[in-house]
Image: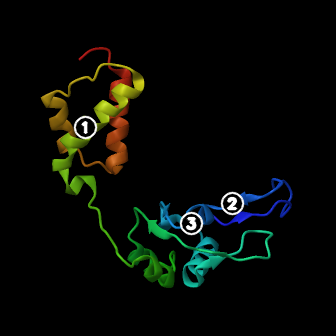
């Protein structure tokens, strides 16, 4: 995230590495699974968000953060705060415009559209004709709870396309 200067530590590349925050300059950086961050990284991220600047490892110069930060998590951060797993001050820095995306089980009407999208995607990727989805197969998918959410549905469709030998 922060980058480093060449020689900052054993094995550091000569010339260093530009961190993701600096690469996102004037743009957007997406931090997925923010609820999984360790307490140390939460503290560092909070400092960056508060100060709008950071220092690459081994550097003596600060770099201004000029990027929009978008985060995602599958955890309920309010519960993680109560459990002591997520910093409340970091939560309020991140939750400026919270958008809750319901789980797939809460929006089963999206399943046919997603199935069609994934069938096309994996048929093209694997160079096979797009197999049609049977009405029985769709009915089974519509009844399933999808604890793994959209990623689980995608995996099921990819596996089906890869293993299909006929329509």
Residue 123's place in the image compared with 113, above or below, is above
Residue 109's place in the image compared with 136, above or below, is below
Q: Which mark is residue 115?
A: 1
Q: Which mark is residue 25?
A: 3
Q: Residue at x 59, y 69 (%)?
A: 38
Looking at the picture, the colour scheme in use is rainbow
Observer-nearest of 131 and 135: 131
Q: Which quarter of the figure is the C terminus placed in?
A: top left
Check if mark 2's residue and mark 3's residue have beta carbons within 8 Å: no
Observer-nearest of 15 and 135: 15
Residue 163's place in the image compared with 63, above or below, is above
Question: CA gap, disc 2 to disc 3?
Answer: 11 Å
Question: Which residue is tagged 2?
Answer: 18
Residue 119 at x, y percent in the picture: 29, 31
Task: State which quadrant residue 165 falls in.
Answer: top left
Q: Residue at x 17, y 35 (%)?
A: 138
Residue 166 at x, y percent in the picture: 27, 14
């Amino acid at each position: 995230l922060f980058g480093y200067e060449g020689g900052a530590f054993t094995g550091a590349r000569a010339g260093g590495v530009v961190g993701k925050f600096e690469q996102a300059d004037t743009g957007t950086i997406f931090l997925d699974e923010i609820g999984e961050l360790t307490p140390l990284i939460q503290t560092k991220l909070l400092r960056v968000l508060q100060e709008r600047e950071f220092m690459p490892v081994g550097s003596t110069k600060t770099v201004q953060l000029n990027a929009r930060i978008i985060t995602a998590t599958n955890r309920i951060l309010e519960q993680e705060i109560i459990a002591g797993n997520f910093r409340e001050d970091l939560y309020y820095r991140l939750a400026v415009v919270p958008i809750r995306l319901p789980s797939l089980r809460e929006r089963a009407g999206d399943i046919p559209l997603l199935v069609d999208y994934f069938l096309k995607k994996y048929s093209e990727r694997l160079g096979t004709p797009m197999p049609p989805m049977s009405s029985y197969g769709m009915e089974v998918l519509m009844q399933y709870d999808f604890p793994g959410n959209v990623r689980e549905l995608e995996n099921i469709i990819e596996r089906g396309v890869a293993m299909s030998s006929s329509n």
